[in-house]
Amino acid sequence: MARFRRFVGFTVLLLVVLGCGGPMLVFPGGALSGEVVTEAVEDWSFVTASFVDLEFRPDDPYSVQLNYVVKDGNLYIDAAEGRCWFDYLRADPRVRVRFDGNVYPLTAVLVGRPGELEGFDEDRFVYRLDARP
């Protein structure tokens, strides 16, 4: 009976994760769902979420939830070596972020290598997320 409950619990969790239209907690997702906003955002200070949903690889979408920083109105993420999504980001800087159901197409621009920028982890690469040209 306990085995059956674990199976049912796992199945329900799997269905929730697959149906969420993006990442969920520690589970990566695919393409982000939501209303696509094409107007450039000049100031990201309105964002209050704890995490950002970030999508990589436009041809084969892969998305994760991670921390972000808004500084002087700009949106930043920091990436550590060894994460598969960091390799995706280096291969193709086109990303999409989702806040409050809105999806923003952006470009990740490397602005700092490990230890270069104050206020970010010493071992991280720092990317500013800019509007796509």
Image (spheres, helix red, strand yellow):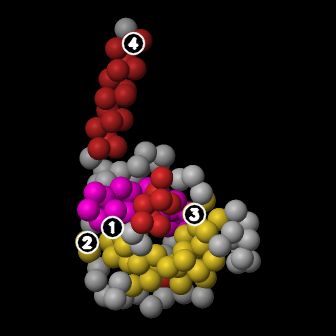
Residue 14 visible to the viewer: yes
- The quadrant the N terminus occupies is top left
53 vs 126: above or below: above
Mark 4–mark 2 Cα distance, whole angstroms, equals: 40 Å
Cβ atoms at labels 2 and 3 below 8 Å apart: no
22 vs 18: above or below: below
- Give the labeled residue for mark 1: 101
Of helix, strand and loop, which one carries label 2?
strand
Q: Residues within 10 Å of mark 4 (few under 14, many from 20)?
A: few
Amino acid marked by disc 3: Ala
- Give the labeled residue for mark 3: 79
Mark 3–mark 1 Cα distance, whole angstroms, equals: 24 Å
Badge 2 or badge 3: first in the primary sequence = 2
Residue for point 33% across, 67% down: 101
Amino acid marked by disc 2: Glu
- Give the labeled residue for mark 2: 35
The residue most toward the bottom is 42
- Give the labeled residue for mark 4: 3
Cβ atoms at labels 2 and 1 below 8 Å apart: yes
Mark 4–mark 1 Cα distance, whole angstroms, equals: 37 Å
Amino acid marked by disc 4: Arg
Count of all numbered marks drawn on residues in the image = 4
